[in-house]
Amino acid sequence: MRRDKTIDPDELNRPAGNSLQENYTLHDKGEQHIMVLLEAQGFTVERWGLQARDDDGEGVLFDDKMDLKVFDDNECVGIIEVKTKSKTRNLGMMNTRHFDDYTQIASEHAVPVAVVFLSPDGRVGYHTQWTLLENDHEPLRAFQWPDGNRGVEIAETHSTAEVLQLLNQQT
């Protein structure tokens, strides 16, 4: 875990006024959606990554863990990062430092490591795109986000059914 005291969560705005707290509200809803989906399939899901966004005004907290660990009969069968995007055109895109962290996690664990990208569909569900990561995973392309962060786009996608089948095969 690390703390960045130079970032004020109230001032960390992206173009179009998309604040850090607004992003986390969208993220939390998407994460809950995935947890419910996995639990309905009989898996136990635990939050793994840091959930704190601001610690008593001392700066924004970060960690390098992914959001969820998935268990079947007390055995870890997968690790999942939830990325919610307000625009479907950004599905499959993330900051480069996150991509590097997640591929490192994939190299350290003998279970499937996945990133699920979600974008609200305007009704009651989500547009969903899954990507399975490996330690030697190569992105489709690199780019720079409007806020200056470096980003990558991942090309490979899998359906929810394919990922559920893979998780079920781990035990």
Image (cartoon, helix red, strand yellow):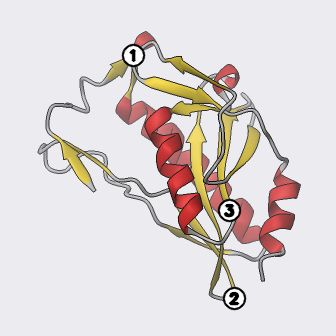
User: What whole-number distance in Å separates the C-alpha atoms at marks 3 and 1?
Assistant: 33 Å
Give the residue displayed 68% in from the left and 62% down from the top: 36
- Residue tagged by mark 1? 147
Q: Are marks 2 and 1 in contact (CB under 8 Å)?
A: no
- Residue tagged by mark 3? 36
- Circle 3 packing at 10 Å, graded few (<14), some (14-19), many (20+), is some
Which amino acid, by three-letter code, is at mark 2?
Asp
Measured along the vertical axis of the image, is residue 13 above or below residue 7?
Answer: above
Classify residue 161 by image quadrant.
Answer: bottom right
Give the residue displayed 47% in from the left and 42% down from the top: 98
Which amino acid, by three-letter code, is at mark 3?
Val
Q: Earlier in the sequence, mark 3 or mark 1?
A: 3
Measured from the top left, where is residue 95 in percent x and y?
48, 32
Residue lying farthest to the bottom in this orientation: 73
**Which type of secondary structure does the marked residue at label 3 adopt?**
helix
- Circle 1 packing at 10 Å, graded few (<14), some (14-19), many (20+), is few
Measured from the top left, where is residue 145 in percent x and y?
48, 17
Q: Are marks 3 and 1 in contact (CB under 8 Å)?
A: no
Where does the N terminus fall, quadrant-wise?
A: bottom left
Q: Earlier in the sequence, mark 2 or mark 1?
A: 2
Measured from the top left, where is residue 148 in percent x and y?
38, 16
Left-right relation of 126 to 64: right
Question: Of tags 3 and 1, which is closer to the observer?
Answer: 1
Question: Of tags 2 and 3, which is closer to the observer?
Answer: 2
User: What whole-number distance in Å separates the C-alpha atoms at marks 2 and 3?
Assistant: 17 Å
On the question of residue 67 being in view, the answer is no
Nearer to the camera, 36 or 97: 97
Which amino acid, by three-letter code, is at mark 1?
Asp
- Residue tagged by mark 2? 73
On the question of residue 117 being in view, the answer is yes
Give the residue displayed 29% in from the left and 25% down from the top: 12
